[in-house]
Amino acid sequence: MKYTLRANSGEKADRLTTLEIKEEEGGLRLYYSAYDSSFYSPFKEDNEPIYDGCVVEIFFSPDGNENEYFEYEFSPGGLVWAGKIRHENGRRLTEMLDPRVPHEVRREGNNYFVEAFIPVEYAAGKSKFNAFRIERNGADSPYLLYAVFPTLCDTFHVPSKLAALG
């Protein structure tokens, strides 16, 4: 399954980002291609708030429950943020997860490519996901947001925007 991300407003993106997802035993293999990046990321450790810099990310609900999903993010520098998100009574709760998942990041010119394996169960016709990219030129620059299924607002955490995988 291959996807091209759109601007989170729903319009055509000004930067090309693609994601290919392949089912494998024990999880999903992700192949991201993120073009025309500034590579901005002032972080040094996994599970720091790398989403405040350039990242590609996926939200994935194995059982299709839109209010509970895994979130994995990958920076152009190879850092990972991992968590389990739960929406409950209008609040978003985050449980941090072990960020050590098999992944590789390669940079070429102004582009970066991420291959990662996330250990989640996949149920054809039931599992749901959405995938994103954040691009920033620096700490004082705006967030440029891209999505497979645009949330049409300033956050990616919109459970109703998770859609069937496959």
Image (spheres, helix red, strand yellow):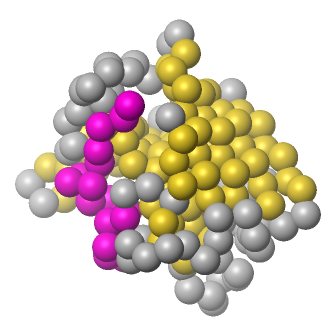
Q: Is 159 located above or below residue 143 in the figure?
A: above
Identify the residue at horizontal 61%, vertical 77% (top origin).
14
Viewer can see residue 3 = yes
Viewer-side residue, 2 vs 113 = 2
Toward the bottom, the furthest residue is: 140
Residue 48 visible: no
How many numbered marks does the figure carry? 0
Q: Name the residue located 14 percent from the left edge and 49 percent from the top edge.
A: 88
Residue 43, given in percent of the width and then of the height, sits at 71, 62
Task: Tell me what residue is drawn at x 61 percent, y 52 percent.
Answer: 18
Q: Residue furthest top?
A: 25
Residue 38: quadrant of the picture: bottom right
Query: Is residue 165 inside the magenta stretch?
Result: yes
Q: Quadrant of residue 85?
A: top left
Q: Give the magenta range.
A: 150-166
Asked if residue 134 lies in the magenta stretch, the reply is: no
| Left or right: where 110 falls relative to 156 | right
Q: Is residue 106 left or right of residue 127?
A: right
- On the image, the x and y values in percent for residue 101 come to 63, 29
Looking at the picture, how far across and down is residue 98, in whole percent?
55, 32
State the residue lying farthest toward the right.
109
Could you tell me what secondary structure mostly forms the magenta stretch? loop
The spot of residue 131 in percent (x, y) is: 46, 51
